Image: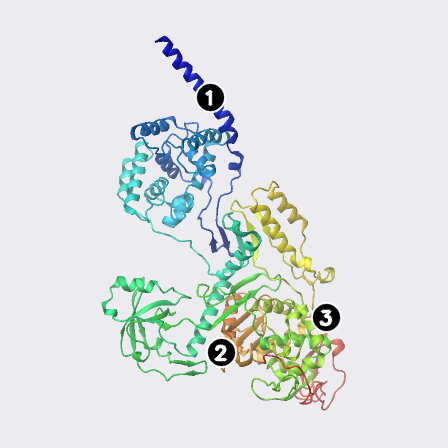
Amino acid sequence: MLRFFFNFLLSIMVFGIISVVIVSWYIVPGLPDIETLKDVRMQVPLRVYSADSSLIAEFGEKRRTPIQIEDVQIKLIEAFLAAEDDRFYEHPGVDWHGIARAVYSLIKTGSKKQGGSTITMQVARNFFLSREKTYLRKLNEIFLSFKIERELSKNAILELYLNKIYLGQRAYGVAAAAQVYYGKDINSLNLAQIAMIAGLPKAPSTTNPIRNAERAMTRRNYVLQRMLTLSHITEEEYKEASESTISASLHTTTIDIEAPYIAEMVRSDLFDKQGDAIYNNGLIVTTTILDRNQNAANQALRNALLAYDKRHGYRGSEHHIDDIELKSEEDIAVLLESFSSLGKLYPALVTHVNEQSVSATISGIGQIEINWQDLEWARKYISENRRGTKPKTAGEILEAGDIIRVIETETGDWALSQIPDVEGGMVSLSPDDGAVLALVGGFDYYKNKFNRITQARRQPGSGFKPFIYSAAIESGKTASTLINDAPIVFDDPGVEDEWRPENYSHKSYGPTRIRVALTHSRNLVSIRLLHSIGVPYALEHIQNFGFDTDQLPHNLSLSLGSAEITPWQMARAYSVFANGGFLINPYFIDEIKTYSDEVLFKAEPLVVCNECAEKKPELSIDEEQLEENQLETLLEETLNEDSDESISAIIEEEINAEEIQYAPRVVNAQNIWITNSMTRDVIKHGTGRRALQLNRSDLSGKTGTTNDQHDAWFSGFNSNVVTIAWVGFDKFQPLGSRETGARAALPIWIDYMRVALDGMPESIMERPKGLVNVRIDPVSGQLANANNPDAIFEVFRIEHAPKSTAETKQPDIFLQESESSSIPEQLF
């Protein structure tokens, strides 16, 4: 017996020595470094915000909002401890009571069921180990838990757990779960909701309240019972919480401001630099977008496109359902849910057609009525220039079973509508530094993700003329220079047809001052003017506005805007007019931070400074790319988890090294002043007169309409805001014979600028030195005689002011009808 006892003790001792050797040689050296937990990088989605801190978008599969333990209400902590590890603050990382229960379960059932895991062990598993159920993994988990407890405080371990744990429905961490299930901040949850979330770690995919309400309630009440047993809550609190119904529902991320095109620009820009890492590193991007401006842009563009669509007739219902009287309410709801709402246009099913009204059903809203005043517009669409006769009854327009689009009016009524085939875009910048204030790339991003501001290359038509006129002013022409507005024919031996450009009105007006020609958008004058200064000279000047001359036509069609240009490029170019002659770089990312509030990037745009213009050298390509390269470098350091260099040190070095960068002057101030005075006349007296309704005298702009009305533009500004609006079909169809820039695009600009400039005092650039006002004869463009009753004032650069009077003066340029020039592929 004694020998048996001795052998038993010896066996235990040998087993213990072998175990220690195995642990020392094999397990302990292989344990990961706990230091990584002290600087852990949570997989947090990329979030994009406006300059007013409104959420624009969230990118990433995992929804997580990291929190600090001191910011969590005590009841939530007590609930998790009661459910998962009530001896958390007592054990050294491993709860031997729990282990004993797990061993007993193994002996009793003969199966390896996971059990006895503490919160520390779950942290070890979630951060370092797999979830396979093996004895070796469990052994690693135990020793890793001891190591974690030695190197981290209990609160630090609990914080990691509450941020890392998966809680179902793509929610990682308690803050994300509170938003997903209740749409609340974690500290706004009541006791029943806290217990519901605390019960999720055991089986988050199958016992969450969205997937299985009954099992979720059972688990919630278990947590409440445990909290009562541990005296964390009273009997009264327990009874009230356990008897409450489940209030959980699926809450998607709440978007505060609709700007999906700018969100995609941010995502694409960061992805091109760093790839998939951006979706999990918790970057917080603040854009330059202003809420008020963006809301106004969204509404202005949609209103204009819907108005265009109504002018051209109704194309009919989107779909038709037979035998709707046999459909249940549930069938109708399922049917309507297959049609997405776009641009605030709801899908609706027509259920009854009356003499001059219809009844329809909208999913989630119910039955609505559409009265005659909101139906009678729907004349049948035949072509862009033809509509059917006016309908007299609702039955001529719709029938029961039609799936239609409806929109809520300002008075709360419902009106028949349709998703426009026509598209458009609008972009607005600050001309002082290029900050994008608003951007809309189409009617609805989820209808078509193509961004017409940055991706659509379209002909600007007459919207390009101010650049030609600026080149003419630079060449020595004046606003009073006479150019003959007369028919002209160009022959080209390589082309069968002759080019016979015309004014939009199909009329010609004889000798015309440049100012008048630009005000009324005279094509023939623009062609002759470009011919007089020469295409090469004009191109050399136009490149100062940021255009790549290799992408511009090198013939006289340039004067009519035959180049293919994006609205983004037009906005940058028009900013040179608005800011007094400086070339800025448009930008939309103002700042990038980590979720822990560490600044990784701060935009340093080129800034307009009149006083500094002479001190700043000409812009170089390296300077243009400096900001982009800085952003890419910082992101590489941030997203590379293996980097040993301190991100903070890099950022501080970069920020301290850079000084304010001033935008280079590219056009002299006198030229800009004269050109702007002419584009102000476009609004006061010309094709942009509709903008007078804004009751401002500081507005400049130019309409643009291309050949056969394929494109309609309005490009305009004051000293504070530059805005470009475009309307057209993606497939380059004609808009219709009367759909000019003034009719189709200018309303977008007006509606937006009404909001964007609200509360801003009028702002015209300060008149530069070197200009003089002179009384001229409006017919000859020369000095007026003292007794001329029709004399007007004109502004000149001092060196180009007229110095003599003339009774009559022949126009500067008169081309013979047979004079040869290249024929452009597309004409104005």
Q: Secondary structure at mark 3?
A: loop
x, y percent for residue 128: 47, 37
Q: Quadrant of residue 513?
A: bottom right
Residue 586 on image: x %, y % = 60, 62
The label on residue 18 is: 1
Residue drawn at x 38%, y 39% as measured from the top left: 76
Camera-near label (2 vs 1) is 1
Q: Residue furthest bottom?
A: 807
Circle number at residue 735: 2
> For this view, does 187 lie left or right of residue 366?
right
Please report whichever mark, 3 or 2, sits nearer to the chain's N-terminal start: 2
> Residue under circle 3?
769
Q: In which image quadrant can residue 376 be found?
A: bottom left
- In this rendering, which labeled residue sits more in front, label 3 or label 2? 2
Viewer-nearest residue: 516 or 556: 556
Label 3–label 1 contact, CB within 8 A: no
